[in-house]
Amino acid sequence: MYKCLVCAWTGLEENPIKDLFSFEVCGCCGCQYGYDIKNLRDVITYREGWLLNSAPWFDNEINLEKQENNRPEKWSIEKAKARIKDHLSSMKFKINDKKDIY
Ligand SMILES: [Zn+2]
């Protein structure tokens, strides 16, 4: 599982920015890599828009095989912000690591 650069959810099936974009849609924030997200500016812009919209959980289908990655109980913008804050430094590291594609 891989972490979303926008929302820090760890439910992505593929590395979103390995060699090419995965084109996977994040189940938490709903961004699509390679479409919504093509560079670091897109990560920041999409995240700001998502938070301005109260950080809605994108995919509300329950997936029993990946239950730990489903929408957490009482999901809220506060939880979204806390998750992003907790992981921002590691996300920056990952982005710097892949700066050639940005
Ligand atoms: Zn996301």
Image (tube, rainbow, N blue to C red):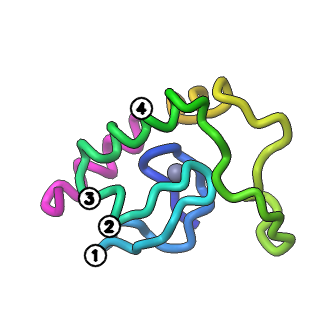
**Circle 4 — which element?**
helix
Kind of residue sitting beneath label 3: Lys
The spot of residue 5 in percent (x, y) is 42, 49
Q: Mark 3 points at which residue?
A: 38
Q: Mark 4 points at which residue?
A: 48
Q: Name the residue under label 2.
A: 34
Considering every residue shown, the one lying at the far top of the view is: 78
**Which quadrant holds the N terminus?**
bottom right
How far is mark 3 from mark 4, CA to CA?
Answer: 16 Å
Q: Which portion, as a residue range, is magenta?
A: 87-102
Considering every residue shown, the one lying at the far left of the view is: 100
Q: Is mark 2 within 8 Å of ligand 1?
A: no
Give the image quarter of residue 76: top right
Q: Do the residues labelled 3 and 2 touch (CB within 8 Å)?
A: yes
The spot of residue 63 in percent (x, y) is 80, 69
**Circle 3 — which element?**
loop
How far is mark 1 from mark 2, CA to CA?
Answer: 8 Å
Q: Do the residues labelled 4 and 1 touch (CB within 8 Å)?
A: no
Which class describes the residues within 10 Å of circle 2: few (<14), some (14-19), or many (20+)?
some
In the picture provided, is 98 more to the left or to the right than 67? left
Name the magenta segment's main secondary structure. Answer: helix
Q: Mark 1 or mark 3: which comes first in sequence?
A: 1
How far is mark 3 from mark 2, CA to CA?
Answer: 5 Å
Q: Mark 4 or mark 2: which comes first in sequence?
A: 2
Kind of residue sitting beneath label 2: Gly
Name the mark on residue 20.
1
